[in-house]
Amino acid sequence: MDVPIEVEVGPEVIAGSTRMKAGTAEKMVLNMLSTASMVRLGHVHSNLMVNVHMKNEKLLKRAITIVTEVADVPTDRAQAALEATGDVKSAIVMLKLGCTSEQARELIRETGNVRKALSMQR
């Protein structure tokens, strides 16, 4: 089903320019749609992206920071949980529920997101 999205942007600040406001409005709409998609897919917990793929040092540090914050644990415990589970969502579940890495990964597979996994009773 096609659904048109029309954004009323009003006149441009600079006469004759037809893309400054329209381009900004388009980018804002696309950002809102992609953000909503990430939330619906279970890639966001609270206001944090928990679907981080640790492909380089910067992303690994980001993942450690996210797990540290969400699970409320020291950095070394967050890093150990990430090494055990291989992903941010499972590491958070493992630390918050005190379960094994296998149990945490299974909960994420079953539920699709951290919030639902944390609400499961094992």
Image: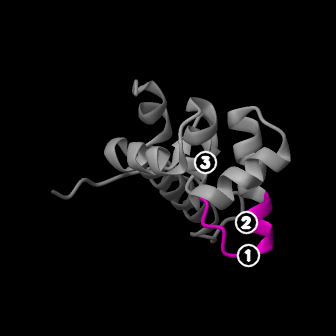
The kind of residue on which mark 3 rests is: Ala
Q: Quadrant of the N terminus?
A: bottom left
What residue is disc 1 on?
56
Left or right: 83 with respect to 89? right
User: Marks 1 and 2: CB-CB under 8 Å?
Assistant: yes
97 sits to left or right of 78 = left
Q: Which residue is mark 3?
A: 91
At 64% from the left and 43% from the top, the residue drawn is: 48
Amino acid tagged 2: Leu
Count every numbered label the image shows and give the total.
3
Q: Nearer the viewer, mark 3 or mark 1?
A: 3
Q: Quadrant of residue 40?
A: top left
The residue wearing badge 2 is 59
The span picked out in magenta is 52-61
Farthest-out residue, left: 1
Q: Amino acid at mark 1?
A: Asn
Indicate the position of residue 74 as horizontal and vertical percent values.
84, 40
Within 10 Å of the Cα at label 1, are there few (<14), some (14-19), or many (20+) other Cα atoms?
A: few
Q: In the visual, does 88 lie left or right of 67?
A: left
Find residue 115 and report its horizontal and vertical position in percent: 48, 32
Q: Nearer the viewer, residue 111 or 24?
A: 111
Query: In the image, what residue occupies the spot 42% across and 46% down?
Result: 108
